[in-house]
Amino acid sequence: MTGSAINSAINAAHNPTDRTRWRLRVDQGRQTWHYISEEEHKANPQTDIEKYWLDLKLDAPELPKATTALESARNGFEFFKRLQNEEGFWSSEYGGPMFLIPGLVITYYITGTKMPDGWSQEIIQYLFNRAHKEDGGWGLHIEGHSTVFGTALNYIVLRLLGVDAEHPVCIKARGTLHKLGGATGSPSWGKFWMAALGVYDWEGMNPVPPELWLLPYFLPIHPGRYWCHTRNVYIPMSYIYGRRATAPLTPLTSQLREELYTQPYDTIPWHQQRNNICKADEYYPHTRLLNFLNGGLVVAEKLTSRTGIRTRALKAAYAQVKYEDENTHYLDIGPVNKVMNMLSTYYEEGKDSEAFKLHAKNNIDFMWMSGEGMMMNGTNGSQLWDAALLIQGVIESGLADEPQNHEAMKRGLMFLDECQIKRNPPFMKEGHRDPTLGAWPFSNRFQGYTVSDCTAEGLKAVLLLQGKLGYTEKRVSMERMKQAVDIVLGMQNANGGFASYENVRGPSWLELINPAEVFGNIMIEYTYPECSTACVLGLAYFREQHPDYRRDEIDATIDRAVEFILSVQRPDGSWYGSWAICFTYATMFACESLSSVGMYYNNSEAVKAACEFLLSKQRADGGWGESYKSCEQHRYVEHEKTQVVQTAWALMALMSAKCPNQNAIQRGIQMIMSRQQPDGQWKQEAIEGIFNHSCSISYGTYKHIFTIWALGRYAKVYGDFC
Ligand code: LAN
């Protein structure tokens, strides 16, 4: 081949695939994208769901222009119904974090695993599209400034997938990486992936000793007490670190060694890099306690790493990898430990093992294809969460009573029935898991982790579907609802609040040894007003329909949870939101809780203060708009633009609080209506979600769910006009 023929062959590999050949399949709540052949494509045309998410032209008709709030909600649901699949849920993009794809691609490279058709080109596309226009780098998440973590790791991805170092995207990204000081300044999770790949030295990383698994559980530092996401990331990380498992050097990784740093690889003083974290990356700096302990661990590492203790510790850590894999049908709690567990399995059981094959097969559940290319979702979807919320909005608005929507509601119930978890984890005790029988998860029952508020929202949706609509079957038995109630009742913490997946198991000072640098509040479970609200309402809805079951406990649990919510209100009347942006989101939840126990604007100072807070943030155009920076900085930060999703949240809060300022509410409703498209949809605006105070995450369905819900509530409260 001539030089130019080689170049065009290389470039062709970086072109997008034929987007019309992508199909989204669903199977018992699992959702997976497939790149199909030309023949299959001809035999099986693309649906609106696929077209919508791929940014292709839909066949959705223009609807009669809405003149009232209810008409607008109806048009919104008319459109959104097109995106419901045959199993009754709504698939959706759940990207945002920019540190997930690197773990996948590095693991595939090390283990020599072939990617399914279309992935490689489309991952490249995604990174090309998401490189920041100004400096060519990537951040922690799609809206964040360029960091070493984002830029070094995604640069590595492009190179491993075959993009040339002299490709303009690589040149620009490398320039930014070098300006930031090079890959030595990466946060620890990046150091880990680079060391595993062989382009960073383990000596430049703080120890992650698997020996922690040999400690007795009564010690507060035992990893079984950590927040389950953190625990599950550090299990395989400690296994791989403990073995110093590094991929053999290849011509490509030797080149990367020279591309990632500002000085020759062999001259880097690695032991001085352990605590070298670029300022642009740092959200939660190391504490002095952590640095002190790490210093001790470095010495301990020299003594133990080749002894029988290490062998025993590796065994204990790997046992935890297995429990997690088996408990989750080899899906794992999230995308980070998913691929770390796959890499651990490769080293422990080999590439031909059944376990490794299952891992390789199941990564597809995390991959999401979009008009921008392929990303890795923050979980294996948000199936249950989106369905449960949307169904509640449609029922509250009264739209569920209209005959054209019966079928959608029946299918929704079918999915909730399917999705409820019908067993406890097989390795519950050994794997430090809590019960799951009767719970609802965030995504699907295969991943199968209980989440407090997902259980409560699932229960609420079932109670409404089965208890309030005349035309649905009783698919979820009383017995199964009681199981869900038992789960919720078991999840209240000593302070009255509810945490996310498990009860708080460790002391809050553990946060002082949070080693991840880029996230806050990750070491233990914390209690949240959002999760607590869902539990309050879930129990209250159940009590209304079934007043006899565990009545005293339900009453007492609700009272204590409401006390908790009141106790975390901030002096300005707002609540800090941990799972979406930010004060607007949590204040909506808190107001819902308080109104459920009869506290409103006119009889509660707390609710009045909440309304005043929200009203003080309303913009001239009638809407609200908050930036993800609120979550980072713990103070309200305005977004440059008004956002329909936050406008809907603020309105939901004001309406549940019975705020007397109807004019403000009406202006908000008009703002939402003004952004509705002729086919009933709302366009994507800024990112909606957040986690760990610093990383934003997309909830691609919120622009439909909360708009419909707020409009529907408005019509219910004020009548159908606007
Ligand atoms: C989620 C998504 C859903 C979210 C809600 C149900 C909305 C919340 O109310 C409770 C917490 C929960 C379940 C939650 C926890 C943390 C998750 C799983 C995420 C924000 C999605 C992605 C994030 C996960 C930790 C991302 C991987 C990163 C690590 C730091 C391991």
Image (cartoon, helix red, strand yellow):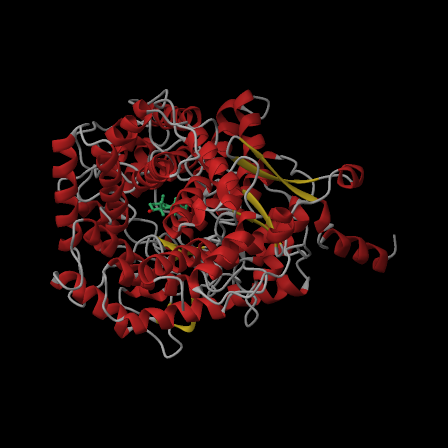
On the image, the x and y values in percent for residue 439 come to 33, 31
In the displayed structure, would residue 180 be above or below residue 225?
below
On the image, the x and y values in percent for residue 613 come to 23, 69
The residue positioned 66% from the left and 46% from the top of the image is 120
Q: Which quadrant of the figure has residue 40?
A: top right
In the displayed structure, would residue 273 be above or below residue 662?
above
In the displayed structure, would residue 428 be above or below residue 206?
above
State left or right for residue 195 relative to residue 453.
right
Residue placed most toward the observer, 44 or 226: 44
State left or right for residue 73 relative to residue 502.
right
Q: Most extreme residue toward the bottom, as rendered?
A: 620
The residue positioned 32% from the left and 39% from the top of the image is 460
Residue placed most toward the observer, 23 or 539: 539
The residue positioned 22% from the left and 40% from the top of the image is 540
Residue placed most toward the observer, 520 or 351: 520
On the question of residue 282 being in view, the answer is no
State left or right for residue 199 relative to residue 536.
right
Residue placed most toward the observer, 648 or 65: 65
Q: Which quadrant of the figure has residue 622?
A: bottom left
The residue positioned 52% from the left and 57% from the top of the image is 75
